[in-house]
């Protein structure tokens, strides 16, 4: 039993995701605003991966196939918007645990849409990951805002993200990651211009201190999205990739506890009960990852 080396990439992406979210959240707190932050993060991905075309040569892919990254990019953006709406209209402590169902949905879509066999141990790992994400994100006993709306938006986001992961696995392995990623993230960047209609003020009005958080946040966001797409498009196994990627819940606890003050984050001061539940969640994450080797 060996751990597939390629799963180290989604594991690393779990850490990049946490760093990205902490940086972008801080940028939002400094007045960048949710939609401008999302726009800049998405264009970080666009600028990072469109130049791959210069290396691989976009002319080698038939133009009749370009509807696939266009569709994938649209699904990605809508899923992203749903998640951000869930967080802004409700509480993260409600939205984040619900997002844990993504691991099971990926396994379900893989099985139903493309008749791919999903090993029983991966289903168990997916279930453990979902429970773990909920435990890792349990908050205090405060009152939550708009719980029903938050849950529905998050479920929609998780469903769209899961569907997109499976489509990227199916389409990307035919294209090759180097060919599929540039048009995918170019589409996301173009669609993101629609977000600017909801902003108050232009990009030039962003204060200098905020840029110090936007730039690294966009950088880590690009690493995260690029790494996941490479994993799915090159090796497939969307369920295993998502189980490994779910380690971001474990990383979020460690980073917030050890370095949260660097990001002006106060979650490290959570109560004893929260810390115990997150410790159990971290152990469940490790158990889920341990089930992946084949």
Image (cartoon, rainbow, N blue to C red):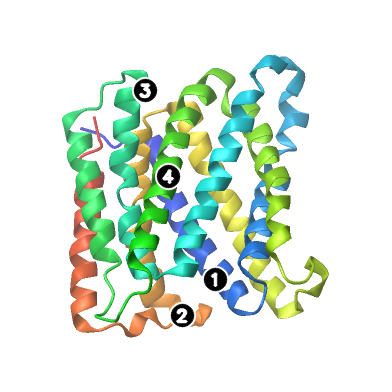
Distance of mark 2 from mark 4, alpha carbons? 25 Å
Please identify, in this view, whether the residue under mark 3 or under mark 2 is nearer the observer. Answer: 3
Distance of mark 1 from mark 4, alpha carbons? 22 Å
* Residue 111 visible in the displayed image: yes
Image-quadrant location for residue 137: bottom left
Give 3 or 16, whichever is nearer the viewer. Answer: 16
Mark 3 or 2, nearer chain start = 3
Residue annotated with mark 4: 10
Mark 1 or 4, nearer chain start = 4
Please identify, in this view, whether the residue under mark 3 or under mark 4 is nearer the observer. Answer: 3
Mark 1 or 3, nearer chain start = 1
Give 103 or 259, whichever is nearer the viewer. Answer: 103
The disc label shown at residue 25, or none: 1
Task: Tell whether label 4 touches label 3 (CB within 8 Å).
Answer: no
Residue annotated with mark 3: 113
Tell me the SS state at disc 3: helix
Distance of mark 1 from mark 3, alpha carbons? 35 Å
Q: Which quarter of the rendering shows the C terminus?
A: top left
Tell me the SS state at disc 1: helix
Q: Residue, x 47% and y 56% (percent of image)?
A: 83
Residue annotated with mark 2: 265
């Amino acid at each position: 039993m060996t751990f597939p080396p390629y799963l180290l990439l989604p594991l690393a992406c779990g850490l990049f995701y946490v760093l990205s979210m902490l940086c972008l959240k801080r940028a939002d707190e400094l007045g960048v605003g949710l939609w401008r932050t999302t726009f800049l993060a998405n264009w970080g991905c666009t600028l990072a991966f469109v130049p791959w075309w210069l290396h691989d040569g976009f002319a080698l892919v038939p133009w009749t196939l370009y509807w696939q990254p266009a569709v994938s990019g649209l699904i990605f953006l809508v899923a992203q918007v749903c998640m951000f709406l869930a967080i802004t209209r409700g509480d993260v402590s409600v939205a984040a645990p619900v997002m844990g169902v993504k691991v099971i949905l990926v396994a379900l879509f893989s099985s139903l849409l493309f008749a791919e066999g999903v090993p029983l141990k991966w289903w168990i790992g997916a279930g453990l990951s979902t429970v773990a994400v909920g435990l890792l994100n349990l908050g205090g006993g405060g009152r939550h805002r708009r719980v029903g709306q938050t849950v529905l938006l998050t479920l929609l986001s998780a469903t769209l993200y899961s569907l997109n992961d499976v489509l990227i696995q199916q389409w990307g392995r035919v294209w090759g990651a180097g060919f599929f990623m540039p048009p995918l993230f170019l589409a996301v960047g173009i669609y993101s211009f629609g977000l600017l209609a909801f902003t108050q003020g232009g990009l030039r009005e962003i204060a200098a201190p905020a840029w110090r958080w936007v730039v690294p946040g966009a950088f880590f966001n690009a690493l995260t999205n690029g790494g996941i797409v490479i994993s799915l498009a090159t090796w497939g196994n969307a369920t295993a990739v998502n189980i490994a990627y779910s380690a971001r819940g474990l990383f979020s606890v460690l980073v917030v506890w050890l370095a949260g003050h660097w990001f002006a984050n106060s979650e490290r001061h959570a109560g004893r009960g929260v810390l115990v539940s997150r410790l159990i969640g971290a152990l469940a994450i490790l158990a889920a990852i341990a089930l992946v080797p084949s």
